[in-house]
Amino acid sequence: MATLRITTQYYENYSDSQTPHWKPKGGQTFIIKDIEGDMIMYCDNLTEVCTNLISAKTNDHVKYEYRDHEVDFIGDEEISVAELTKEIRDQFNKEGNYATNDIPGFEGTLEKLNALTIFSQSDESLITRHKTKLSSEFSENDIMCSADLDNEWANESE
């Protein structure tokens, strides 16, 4: 069994039936349930059928204009209000999936970025060293940046 959802634009007539003045007032969805799947699959032009069904609902006071349709063969999956509320609270409080530990353009957390060491080499000694967190020693997790390393990495891809 399938469900057909027809999305329409809803209009109201702000005049009389002799000289109608239609104003769009929002969307309206029509739902047709328990349709045989084969009937939908073998319909030559479902858009035309939906348009004609919707046009039949129009009268002097309201009209509906076909926008789109969707056929659902599986059924609805429900999300509870509690799940939605928790997700919105997490986003507001920057918790869970919304935690701001990751830095855009940097693979890692703020802690890793703070521990990052950048230095350059000229001749054989370290001339410049900058570390966001002050430290007197390099560790094995320090990142080396130099023109020599750039050339070495560039040549690896050849």
Image (tube, grey):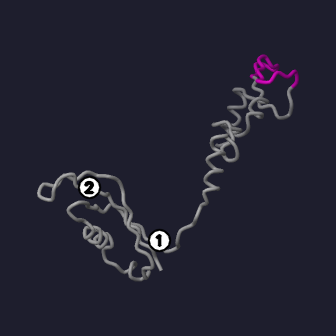
Instruction: Determine whether the residue tagged by mark 2 lies in a helix, strand or loop.
Output: strand
Residue at 11% over, 58% down = 18
Q: In this image, 107 relative to 63: left or right?
A: right
User: In the drawing, what numbered circle is on residue 45?
Assistant: none
Q: Amino acid at mark 2?
A: Glu
Can you name the residue that lies furthest to the front here?
Answer: 16
Residues drawn in magenta:
120-137
- Pinpoint residue 147: horizontal percent, then vertical percent: 69, 26
Q: Amino acid at mark 1?
A: Asp
Name the residue nearer the viewer: 111 or 98: 98
Q: Picture quarter containing residue 124?
A: top right
Residue topped by disc 1: 72
Compared to 87, does 67 lie above or below? below
- Pinpoint residue 37: horizontal percent, then vertical percent: 44, 80
Residue topped by disc 2: 12
Can you name the residue that lies furthest to the left here?
Answer: 18
- Pinpoint residue 157: horizontal percent, then vertical percent: 65, 43
**Real-space CA distance between mark 2 and mark 1, rounded to the nearest whole angstrom:** 29 Å
Q: Residues within 10 Å of mark 1 (few under 14, many from 20)?
A: some
